Amino acid sequence: MSTFVIGDIHGEYEQLKVLLAKMNFGKQDKLYVLGDLVDRGPDPIKTLQFLMRLSNCICLVGNHEFMAYMGMKILLKEVTEESVCDFAEEDQEKLKEWMLNGGAVTIADFVGLSREERKEVMEYLGNLETYVELEVNGQKYLMVHAGLGNFSEEKPMEEYTLDDLIWARADYSIPYYKDKIVVTGHTPTQTIPDNPHPGCIYRANNHIVMDCGAGFKEGRLAGICLENGKEYYAKEN
Ligand SMILES: [Mn+2]
């Protein structure tokens, strides 16, 4: 039994399949996905539907799932004379933000789904985990999409806001906890200052950063096995 963690997929379904094959991922294993399954890449909804049917997989919520969930709710609103007026302001801003963040491809997929499939997808998006804590071989891990905004070491996890967990940039220059490794996505390792290995999994100061830029042209999907630290990449660098 192995415990695998995968970074931000962003609709790269084909890379996901390649990565799982390289990991030799099977029924006896456990998979954690750090959020940002959707937007940007070619197959966001296919990726989401594949993972939601995988019983040994837990997905965390990323800022893109949050934008998608809010956006889908708006798209399914019954249009009445009153709601059209609301639509004009706040809802349009939300949809615009989602589009600016690569949402167009997710919207295109979503509108092509049956009523039943839309319901399933939204239920799944609305019930993703915000963080997961676990221990593997005596090592503690905290997995969260983005970071710990407004961090303090004594602060209990349930006191962080959703924004702190899915939007805030983690500070990789300091260890957050002495005895716990924080595993995050959200920030492509290509953008970490002074990173000697951009596009590879970044490990420093009790951080593991998994987002290797999948969904962007030069990016790729990455995974790690927590039992032995082995790294996997869907594409060679
Ligand atoms: Mn993100």
Image (cartoon, rainbow, N blue to C red):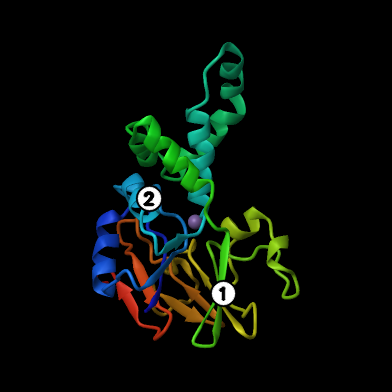
Q: Is residue 196 above or below residue 36?
A: below
Q: Nearer the viewer, mark 1 or mark 2?
A: 2
Quarter containing the N terminus: bottom left
Give the image location of residue 217, x and y in percent.
30, 56
Which part of the image, by quadrant, shows the C terminus? bottom left
Q: Is residue 191 above or below residue 65?
A: below
Say which of 193 and 234 sits in front: 234
Look at the numbered disc 1 and give the secondary structure of its residue: loop
Q: Are marks 1 and 2 in contact (CB under 8 Å)?
A: no
Q: Is residue 71 in view?
A: yes
Horizontal and vertical percent position of residue 204: 51, 82
Q: Find the residue positioned furthest to the right.
A: 154
Q: Secondary structure at mark 2?
A: helix
Residue marked by disc 2:
48
Q: In this figure, what is the number of numbered marks?
A: 2
Q: Give me the residue at 37% from left, 58% from top.
A: 9
Label ID, residue 172:
1
Q: Is mark 1 within 8 Å of ligand 1?
A: no
Residue at screen point 47% across, 41% down: 122
Q: Position of residue 236 (x, y in %)?
A: 24, 72
- Name the foreground residue: 4 vs 30: 30
Amino acid carrying mark 2 in the image: Leu
Q: Residues within 10 Å of mark 1 (few under 14, many from 20)?
A: some
Q: Residues within 10 Å of mark 2 (few under 14, many from 20)?
A: many
**In the rendered view, does 160 fall on the left or right side of 62?**
right
Name which residue type carries label 1.
Tyr
